[in-house]
Image (cartoon, coloured by chain):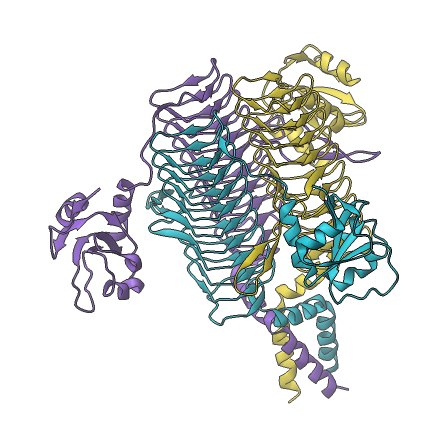
Chain colours: A purple, B yellow, C cyan
């Protein structure tokens, strides 16, 4: 795709300052701009790069005033970040695919909607239902009786076990496993463990995005539920019977143990662990690597530590932890004085 | 499957109190019961749900006495939990599959037993051996010379590298990788690292269950060994030359570094890390997110922390950690008094 | 493969002490030697096993003097460890594969080099390029426009998204995902999050090895870069726009958040977490389970803790943390004296 600065400005409802005919064929971060690329400046702390970037043009906010003289072409818009993101969507890395590649397997009882892509070596089981405009990339496994909504993207090697439900506008990245058995074993009197059958399923609501190699286990009974708008990163573990509330965001390698209920609009950091059978209030923020060991009742807190408590208290305690040798030495000195 | 309460009671060797002809077509948790569903009450802390559940019948212990009046049908058995689990096994989510789907690849030198399922796009390499009644789901990879026992379930996209051994009654969930190279590199004098070849294998004994997207590396020399009865959850890392003792249970996202030897009947929490070249005594319990940095000699301890020590000591120390600001302030006050 | 001790000595440029005609058919660790096996002794702390091993011969350093009498055959070389590793490479677990298995999919516009292996159910997209002597194992996904160099090994079920670049002599183990979308979402005024398109790619330079089920996300703009010689273990998360410097080694289950820049020759322990948008100096060592929350400017430090600081300081503080109950009791005693 190649556009002039004038064409870009028109798309974005902006104005050009500089050369409107300059040709732009790629998008770049301001510190990595190359001739022919268009970049943007939204965060003032990157302004220094504006005077050194090799990009040909830059999208800036309407009210932006450069501190020094610049040579490159400016495209002024009301919100530089949003305008640039809108452009990125048009430069997206992969065009929509469609059609059924002949080396795929679609069970005769499966229902496949309009304008669906099914890649080679994908497997669609008995009585599965695939909504319109959904892309099923190669080597994906859709078990028997799975329902997938409209406009979904299931990338290569996604596995969805029997009976799970996926809403519309859902994206699932490569290698993610939905609906494997929950980890349920009952200790036996004589020796070892007996498996507790896992006969529930997983329900993923609309507008969810799930990263690569994440695992979401099916419920023992009932459903493990990922509510609408949730965003899950890579390598996350969601155990059986967990519920993740609307629009909650979870970063990579976090884990949620069985039957935990996570509220809406929470933000959960990377490598966080959440114990089972508890609930977490809406809008809770949890710092990376923290562990949550008991129910969080009050909304909107930010927590850190393992087990976690209020983040500013944690940071204060941690400062003293770093100085514990000195604190202990002070104590020893006092003891000497007091004998 | 639909049964009357009388039929369920007969299956379980129990007695009906209420309507023996009521029809039951699903199983549910007591807090999620719907008309037509059968539920159970084993843990007294859930008793309140008994008076509000919409389920049609409930399995209870013989000696259970409800605190209030209830309308739904009771099925009394000697152990409500065990009886209900036995029922669940009959409602299991997926029927056994059998037959060889034509789009699979089975090397002419591979031996496949009786009543085996091989799904489409599964790959079974040269000289591999698959025991009777084993299910190999679609897109699974069984490398050359791999041996798999009887009655195993290998779900979609499991990968087993060349020469590994899997016993009987073993279940491995989707995306798990058995036998990738251990992480062994020797620093070079000039620069970088040279690979240490990993020429051992992985041995998985009978009655093991392994979750989804877990990785178990092949040994450098000899074998990485998962002893009989072990249960591993999702996204676990087992490094080269590790041995996990009989009936040990490991929760999701835990990692065990190279050549560690873990005892029998241990319980290892989620996100635990275990350093290499150490051993852990039988029946050790390790709290979630803990790190084990040295050999654990005494059996039956419960450990927490990173590095971990006795859990009650950890909890006591952590209480003071939370109050460190206050402790330091008290110390400062004393210092002022003593100057 | 079977060799006599004399033949092994000749291969290694060493000398035999004992029976030069003894036949050796396998390699083993010294504590696991069986008759017919060859083992080695490099680390003196394993010397005790020399007097009990059932191995038939052992490779030792030229200057090694046994403390007791031994019966097995010695092969003396200048560096026992390196010599043994060289032998292991010849006993490697899997022979090179070649040829195109007919059930694979290769897009007509893809370019495949000389002596390449493409396993069944592998998918090679439009305009992809595969270099000479590369092995693409079964069920691997190579997206459109992906370039792979020479002498690479991509094991079963590796997924590489559209447009990514892989150098030469690169090994990627089963289930690893390269190029899934970075985790980028912008909060919306009304509700939920809007996806920030991820239009960059991943670049993996030469001589990199990546373990199983690891995930490396594509950049938002530009490239996520893994520099030459880097070794990544299993289940690692590398987020969008990260750069990992030459010859850095990262252990299993570590995670690196977006836009972090990691230096050369770093050694990063298992389950470490690194926050985004920071940089880490060359030759930094990070202990397992640590968290890095801010830029590390000084080269060559070893760090521990979450957040991490100098490891010997951490260890000292942790000793006092273990004794915090006692420290607090001492403080209380002093307070009593001072009232």
Q: Nearer the viewer, residue B167 or B282?
A: B167
- Report if residue A115 is visible in the image: yes
Instruction: Give the image quarter of residue B125.
Output: top right
Above or below — where is C279 with respect to B69? below
- Between A204 and A298, the one lying in front of the other is A204
**Is B233 situated above or below A305?**
above
Residue B202 % position (x, y): 68, 40
**Labels in figure, total:** 0
State the residue lying farthest toward the right.
Answer: C69
A83 left or right of B289 in image: left
State the residue at coordinates (60%, 75%): B329
- Left or right position of C29 against C175: right
Vertical position of residue B326 compared to residue B228: above or below: below
Q: Residue at x 58, y 54 (%)?
A: C251
Residue B268: x, y in percent?
70, 47
**Residue B201 is drawn in which quadrant?**
top right
Going by the image, does B207 lie left or right of B118?
right
In the image, is residue C185 above or below residue C307? Answer: above
Q: Residue at x 78, y 36 (%)?
A: A192
Q: Residue furthest top?
A: B21
Where in the figure is residue B325, as x and y percent of width and height? 59, 70
Residue C339 in sight in this render: no
In the rendered image, the quadrant that contains the C terminus of chain A is bottom right
Give percent across and percent down for residue B23: 64, 12
Q: Residue C80's image quarter?
A: bottom right
Q: Nearer the viewer, residue A309 or B97?
A: B97
Q: Quadrant of the N terminus of chain A?
A: top left
């Amino acid at each position: 795709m190649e556009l002039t600065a004038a064409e870009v400005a028109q798309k974005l409802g902006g104005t050009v300052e500089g050369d409107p005919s300059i040709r732009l064929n790629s998008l770049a971060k301001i510190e990595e701009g190359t001739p022919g690329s268009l970049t943007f400046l939204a965060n003032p702390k990157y302004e220094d790069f504006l005077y050194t970037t090799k990009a040909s043009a830059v999208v800036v906010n309407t009210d932006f005033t450069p501190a020094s003289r610049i040579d490159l072409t400016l495209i002024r818009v009301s919100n530089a970040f949003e305008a640039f993101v809108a452009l990125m969507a048009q430069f997206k890395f992969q065009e929509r695919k469609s059609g059924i590649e002949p080396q795929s397997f679609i069970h005769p009882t499966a229902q496949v909607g309009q304008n669906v892509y099914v890649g080679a070596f994908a497997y669609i089981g008995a009585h599965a239902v695939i909504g319109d405009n959904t892309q099923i990339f190669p080597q994906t496994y859709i078990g028997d009786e799975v329902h997938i909504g409209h406009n979904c993207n299931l990338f290569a090697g996604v596995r969805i076990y029997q009976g799970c439900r996926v809403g519309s506008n859902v994206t699932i990245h490569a290698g993610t496993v939905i609906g494997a058995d929950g980890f349920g074993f009952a200790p036996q009197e004589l020796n070892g463990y007996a498996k507790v059958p896992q006969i529930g399923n997983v329900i993923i609501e609309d507008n969810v995005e799930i990263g690569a190699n994440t695992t979401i286990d099916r419920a023992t009974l009932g459903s493990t539920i990922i509510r609408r708008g949730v965003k899950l990163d890579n390598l996350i573990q969601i155990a059986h019977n967990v519920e993740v509330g609307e629009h909650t965001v979870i970063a990579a390698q976090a884990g949620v143990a069985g039957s935990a209920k996570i509220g809406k609009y929470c933000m959960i950091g990377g490598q966080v662990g959440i114990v089972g059978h508890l609930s977490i209030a809406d809008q809770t923020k949890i710092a990376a690597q923290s562990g949550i060991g008991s129910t969080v009742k009050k909304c909107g807190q930010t927590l850190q530590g393992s087990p976690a408590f209020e983040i500013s208290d944690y940071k204060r305690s941690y400062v003293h932890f770093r100085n514990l040798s000195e604190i202990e030495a002070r104590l020893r000195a006092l003891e000497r004085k007091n004998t």
